[in-house]
Image (cartoon, rainbow, N blue to C red):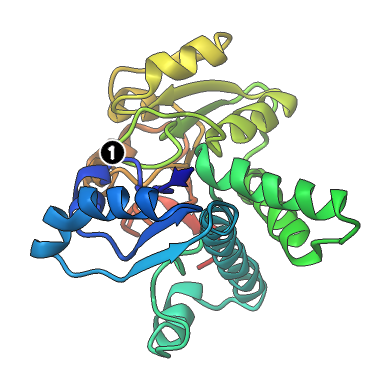
Amino acid sequence: MGMNPEFLREGTAVDDFRHPDKVVIGANADWATDRLNAVFDPLLETHAAPVVETDPKTAAMIKYANNAFLATKISLGNNLGNVCKEFGLDAYEVMEAVGLDDRISEQFLRSGVGWGGSCFPKDVDAVRAAARDAGYDPAVLEAAVKVNERQPERLVDRLKQRVDLEGTRIAVIGLAFKPQTDDIRNSRAIPVIELLQDHGAEIVAYDPVANEPMRERIRAIEYATTARAALSDSDGAVVVTDWDEFAALDDAFDEMANPVVVDGRRIVELRDGITYDGLTW
């Protein structure tokens, strides 16, 4: 028996495959290890990467632990970012310096509205469930999930401080769980939309590629064909996905009825003429 867990990210999967950080081979027979090594030999001739040879169960745990660690790092960054916000500090300035420590690195320290997708949630849940079944309380992972679940609430709360949501038109900018994909699985836009609906807001949403997938999930809102159209005549806006095009909206905000923007991804540029609030900065 042999297995080879993948460590590919949506949106950059081809590049990740061609430039792996590591190759993990889990096998309980020499022939299986040899065959998996033969598969990766051509790739590793052009891009050297460590090859970890182990048994199948350990290989599976490496995959789960890898994603659980990254999800927890993001949640820790968000937790510290929330603390920074309470003291009027810019979490990005803080984390830029923290990331210079080579024991930490700058990766996955961008704080915001949280992580989603398919891999992080299912892998963290798998480790949590397995730990509980074994009689162990995975307290740090439980906390990581709790912080992640609360970030959409914090985003909506920031907007509530500036806009009476009942009966107002709110633009939700970005629906995919991350840029470069139309995947809405566990997207933070879903709880954001649900929370806004709970407060009586009328929602108009936009994403460059994820409108239709989200329409299949949530039908009772309006979907715009451009970010400008979503912002037009809106009483407030929240930014949930950091697509590059959102950094260039600029004068589109002038078309808002009430130019209040709460940014969950630090993609919108602060400018005159809008009331801007960053989630952790």
- Rendered view: 241 above or below 78: above
> Going 46% across and 28% down the picture, which residue do you hit?
234
- Rendered view: 90 above or below 26: below
Residue 182 position by quadrant: top left
Q: Is residue 178 left or right of residue 141?
A: left
Say if residue 157 shows up in the picture. no
Residue 11 position by quadrant: top left
> Going 49% across and 51% down the picture, which residue do you hit?
264
Helix, strand or loop at mark 1: loop
> Going 86% across and 48% down the picture, which residue do you hit?
133
Q: Percent x, y for residue 48?
A: 18, 70
Few, some or many residues within 10 Å of mark 1 (<14, 14–19, 20+): some
Q: Percent x, y for residue 160?
A: 67, 44
Instruction: In this rendered view, identify the residue nearer to me: 102 or 228.
Output: 102
- Rendered view: 142 above or below 187: below
Instruction: In this rendered view, identify the residue nearer to me: 281 or 219.
Output: 219
> Going 31% across and 30% down the picture, which residue do you hit?
227
Q: Percent x, y for residue 44?
A: 17, 62
- Residue located beneath label 1 in the image: 180
